[in-house]
Image (cartoon, coloured by chain):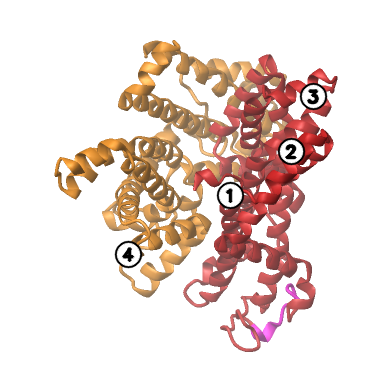
Amino acid sequence: MLFYIIRRILQIIPVLIGITLILFTLLYIIPEDPARLILQKGATEQALENLRAKMGIDKPVYVQYWRYLKQLSKGDLGDSYRYRRSVNSILAEHYPNSIKLALAAIFIEIVIGIFAGIVSAVKKYSFWDTLVTISTTLAVCVPIFWLGMMLQVAFGLKLGILPMSGMGDGSISYYILPSITLASVSTAFVARMTRSSMLEVMSNDYIVTAYAKGLSNFKVIVKHALKNALIPVITLIGLDLGAFMGGAILTETVFNWPGVGRVIYLAILQRDAPVVIGGTLILVLIFVFMNLLVDVIYAWLDPRIRYYKKEINI
Amino acid sequence: MYPEKKIEEEKSSEITGELILERKYTRSSLYKDAWKRLKKNKLAMLGLAIVISLMLIAIFANFISPYNPIERIKEEYLLSPSGAHFFGTDLLGRDIFSRVIYGSRISIEVGIIAVGISMFIGLFFGALSGYFGNISDAVIMRVADIFFAFPYILGAIAIMTILGPGIINIFIAIGVLGWAYFARIFRSSILSIKNKEYIEAARALGASNYRIITRHIFPNAMAPIIVYATMNVGTAIIVEAALSFLGIGVQPPTPAWGKMLAESLDYIDIAPWMMLFPGLAIVITVLGFVLLGDGLRDAFDPKLR
């Protein structure tokens, strides 16, 4: 198990280096002079020259890349071109907001997704099953930014019961619309997966045995079936959490949420390369780490995988 | 499950030894059978109907739309839906119904061309990786890992900022980002096929690698690719809408659904129809491709149901 974890961690390193390389190359192609971005209009040629030399951008690109990697190994993501601050401090300010939103969305995903999935599996082909199937199919087709706008109109504008945008004082009411928007697609996937996983488990012999022992319907479903049926669902939820923490650009834009997705989006528009590279790197790091965590939890939850991996010595 | 006629035919070919006839028959039967099952699936047929009508709408947009989609009628701005303007008008007095009709062109184009690009790149690298294995496999799959870890929307935004807005660049951005999944599916199909007897037989007969891949592996590995491609068209359409919504996709005055939604943002209180209809258009379009994709998956592999 330990060997497996170490091996997976070592596999992450080339992925991260590849991503810095891609981002660095992409942003190097942008024909804009960072020195001009920082000093803005009216700067003298001499001042620009000095700044370029100080930042090292007069050097060839591989020298710059090497410098960046060295700096990165110390945990320093560099300084923003637009704001006179370090990228670390910008991200540290906005990350908590994104994580809070991600957790709220995951909460919705777990509660509604799993519940809908169970109901639809237990009452197969009933009205509720059909309802869940139709709404999950529709949820996948709705662009989340449009869903966000519709919710804003319905609950913010027409009914006037929920705030339309921003984080306000941070009270729960501000979280409701953005987290529903962010969670919509994944909740549908969780519901579908719970349904199919439950149906598969319910056809097993040990469920028949449990019924034969005279256990109540509730006990069989919750204590015997659900435990096993949720294993693949947990994987899905873990991956979503990783994706939510950085992938909320659209939701954060529609709702004016002061999170990291919006910061990266604005930085891309403003050609603020250090913020883009640094932000994306952290985001990918979280995503890859969540992937790893999910794999480990999976192996821990399902002994069959653990023993199988021992046998073939992964 | 099998009609009796088929069994008879197989037997007769066995007896007469007409190998070519038999191969021809089995090759077409997977797709024929799938089509038969697809026809029985009502939802899939609904999806197919949506997709076909959308294509017709896109092709004949100039005949269907009552107004010029970029013509501004100054006196008729922000009109609510009526008999003259089915979906109302926007701030510049343009007919929203006509703009939604013309918008289908962009969405369908992006969906098909971008997914085509992804598929082309993905199949090429998937074949390299699955058929030849070893170093090419390791390198290609690690590069694919990088693309998997990279958030799709973020990648598309980054590429669009560098290339600049415009429809061709949207094809490139969405097309280039989507290849990894195609490569992975095709690789695993190939891995499961390449050691089968009929491939060995082809090799023993002296067929080249190129011939084996294109004539023997390709037709047998295409089913999951077709399913994924169909569903992926829907995703590509949503991503294009998102890019245009964020202002880095299709540029005005070209009518695109995502762009229309962005334009409606400031008027959601006084002109909600501006956001309602383009959004519905996206949902129906994507629904069509999703239903068709679902149906195709069931049709190709009835065991999965």
Q: Is residue A288 visible?
A: yes
Mark 1 lies on residue: B1
| Extent of the magenta region | B68-76
Label 3 sits on a secondary structure element that is helix
Q: Determine if marks 2 and 3 fall on one subunit.
A: yes
Q: Determine if marks 1 and 4 fall on one subunit.
A: no
- Which residue lies at the image location 53% right of the left edge and 77% below the top edge? B271
Label 1 sits on a secondary structure element that is loop
- How far apart in space, not on screen, are marks 1 and 4 (Cα)? 56 Å
Callout 2 environment at 10 Å: few (<14), some (14 to 19), or many (20+)? some
Colour chain B appears in? red
Callout 4 environment at 10 Å: few (<14), some (14 to 19), or many (20+)? some
Reading the chain from its start, which is encountered first: label 1 or label 3? Answer: 1
Mark 4 lies on residue: A162
Q: Chain of mark 4?
A: A
Q: Which chain is orange?
A: A
Q: Chain of mark 3?
A: B
Q: Chain of mark 1?
A: B
- How far apart in space, not on screen, are marks 4 and 2 (Cα)? 54 Å
Mark 3 lies on residue: B202
Three-letter residue code for mark 2: Pro
Q: Quadrant of the N terminus of chain A?
A: top left
Residue B129 lies in quadrant: top right
In the rendered structure, the answer to whether residue B56 lies left or right of residue A307 reads right
Mark 2 lies on residue: B219
Label 4 sits on a secondary structure element that is loop
